Amino acid sequence: MQDSTPYAVGIDVGGTKTHLRALAGGGRVVDRVRASTGWRPHDPGAAADWLTALVHDALPTGTRPSAVAVGGHACETPRQCEGIRAALQERLGAPALVVGDAALLVPAAGLEKGVGLVAGTGSVAVGRLPDGGPVQVGGWGAALGDEGGAAGLVREAARAVWAAHDRGEEPDALATGLVAAFGVAEVPALGAALEAATDVSAEWGRHSPVVFAAAEAGSPLARAVIADGGRALAALVVRLAGRGVSVDDVVVAGGTVLAQPALYQAFTSALAESLPGARPRPLRVPPVEGALALARSLL
């Protein structure tokens, strides 16, 4: 017999892990975390199949979702998200909504409007125009952007130590830390080590603790890289403000910015200077709560 209880399903598909949370009758019934292996957001059919299998595997036998909302890593444009949404809704036979994963932060914080800023491995900021249209800035990947994210910080740290090397300076704590982390013999060899990465964001980003450790050890280069990263994150919010997005509240998430007080302080200081009225708010609940809130709004 089919269970008629409404099951609202929220899914946060991150770059590394996926969190699914489902509620029935106001009580939590499912809470699952799994690897995001196999997530292909640029193929709507494949993405919808992956999400459908995830939902069916998570919900109790004989039940079905009444609404599903997904925040998807690398779901970068409204057109891309709509393609996944349409395919997912067809497969599940239930109302569906698909947004970029950063769009979960504002509803997760219990807000109706504001900015969602993520600085984890990468960095991105999102908001909505007065007419409800979504806007995303940043998030261009470690090779070209993602300033203030872990991979971007490592990239800029490498540039800083190369410049110091070219000036004839002795290696400081940042240089020695990067050389050790990448397993090379000297600063000039860092270039080949960075270029050899097959997964640039992950392989560069995992070395970001070196930057913060060097800053604590007194490296002016590392401190400058962190300060620049904080300013770059604030600049994302400034760009959204320039597009007409409400920036009164800035909900901040991500394993880099929230785990590293030096970066968070650099960001908030730069934000206060650029946009004195903006209020940074660290997200204290899992982003999947935002997906769940969006799913419940579809019921």
Image (cartoon, helix red, strand yellow):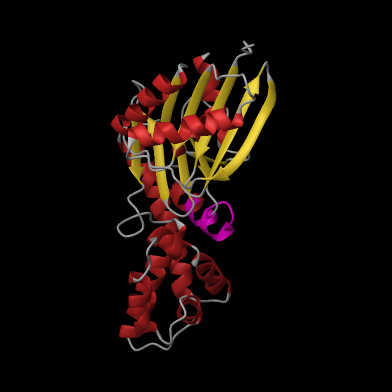
Q: Residue at x 39, y 20 (%)?
A: 90
Q: Position of residue 70 (x, y in %)?
A: 47, 31
For the question of whether residue 26 can be seen, the reply is yes
Q: Nearer the viewer, residue 240 or 211?
A: 211
* Vertical comparison of 51 with 23: above or below: below
Q: Is residue 40 left or right of residue 64?
A: left
Q: Residue furthest right?
A: 27
Place residue 136 in its image quadrant: top left
Magenta-span inclusion, residue 263:
yes
- Looking at the image, which residue is at 36% across and 23% down? 86
Up/down of 86 relative to 20, above or below: above
Of residues 175 and 179, which is closer to you in this image? 179
Quadrant position of the N terminus in the picture: top right
Residue drawn at the location 55% of the way across and 28% of the way down = 56
Using the image, determine if residue 235 lies above or below residue 283.
Answer: below
Left/right placement of residue 259 relative to residue 118 reads right
**85 or 163: nearer the viewer:** 85
Residue pictured at 35% horizontal, 53% vertical: 141
Residue 216 percent across, percent down from the top left: 58, 71
Q: Position of residue 8 (x, y in %)?
A: 57, 21
Query: What number of labels is visible?
Result: 0
Residue 24, magenta (yes or no): no
Residue 229 pos. (x, y %): 43, 58
List the single residue furthest toward the front. 1
Magenta stretch bounds: 256-267
When asked about the image quadrant of residue 29, the answer is top right
Residue 299 vs 22, above or below: the answer is: above
